[in-house]
Amino acid sequence: MKFLAAFAAALALVALASAPARAASALERIRVALSTKDYGYLPLFVGMRAGFFKDEGLDVQWLVVNTNVVVTALMAGEIDVAGAAGSAMRAATRGAPLKAIFFTHQRCTFVLVGAPEIKRVQDLKGKVIGITAPGGSTEIASAMVLEHYGLNPKKDVTYFSAGGAETAVQAMQQGIIQARAFNPDAAFILKKKGFTELASLADIGAWPWAGYATSEAKLTHERGKIKRWTRAMVRSLQLMLKNREETIKIAMREFKHPRDVAESASAVSVRAIDPRDPGGASEESLKQNIELTITAPMQLKDPPPINKVVDFSVLREVQKELGVGR
């Protein structure tokens, strides 16, 4: 209950701040929850700055909502869409009426960064890799890189929970850890400071990434609204694929990065988009995602069926109307 009260207060402040804009534009409000404002959510901001949501009659209000309460907020109907597909899919596995509906990238956008003395992935054998938490996305991403380069992620390295990006950088500088997976913009900022870019997950293997989820109630009773949001997001991915310069300019303006960082980070983001299936994911990659982020960490005997945790019906309608997709 304390969460709902605090959440309602936050929403009231957002509504108050944006009331004049809504009155002037007469757009329908759609609330989108993010765990934090980072480069993984670039397509959302591209769509906002390019006017795609406005074209759909939507006024996007994005809110930072902690991942441990986003499921509650989704189920309560306090938010429409959440950039927390992983949390929603795990909750759906337990029976929550939630579905992942959109993945902005077909591959992870993390970049594995090493301390200055680490020059290649193979140099990590016997070393310590920083992660946010055991079994989390930074550990999974690091393991994928290690396997790709012939190392055994369970035997050849040690993992150390080093917290967020800032504390992880300090841990590398102090020699506590020798590498960590970062969002692409943070990775290229570190590269300018002498750290080593070891590998980009966008060049390795499929892993549906930066996904969004909604409630089954929204899909049933506010399907048109979710569809308009989805159409704007697909158009955002198309812009990123076709207009490199505009993407870089939006990234610079939104994240306050110099051009070289925005250019390098955007290149990673674009490489991770599937032009044949913008917003979607293959059955094979979804099965892998479920194994890595649900079955293994939840210690399930059998994985949940894809249709229990994912619903691409709105996305497929949008792709067909726009003439894109598989």
Image (spheres, grey):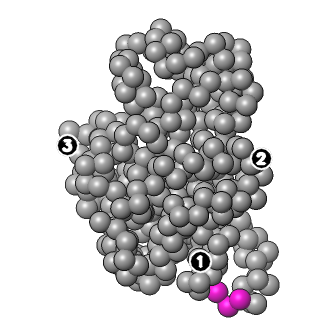
Q: Which residue is mark 3?
A: 302
- Left or right of 249 in this view: 215: left
Spatial separation of the CA atoms under disc 3 and disc 1? 39 Å
User: In screen coordinates, is 250 left or right of 119?
Assistant: right
What amino acid is labelled 2 in the image? Pro
Q: In the rendered structure, which segment of residues is drawn in magenta?
A: 25-29
**Residue under circle 2?**
258
Q: First in sequence, mark 1 or 2: give its number.
A: 1
What residue appears at the point 63 percent right and 13 percent down from the top-left corner?
117
Horizontal and vertical percent position of residue 101: 40, 65
Front tag of 2 and 3 = 2
The mark found on residue 53 in the picture is 1
User: Seen from this angle, which residue lies furthest left?
Assistant: 302
Task: Report crowding for label 2: few under 14, some 14 to 19, many 20 or more residues within 10 A (C-alpha).
Answer: some
Q: Nearer the N terminus, badge 2 or badge 3?
A: 2
Determine if residue 158 is in view.
no
Taking the spot 79% from the left edge, 84% from the top edge, the residue there is 20
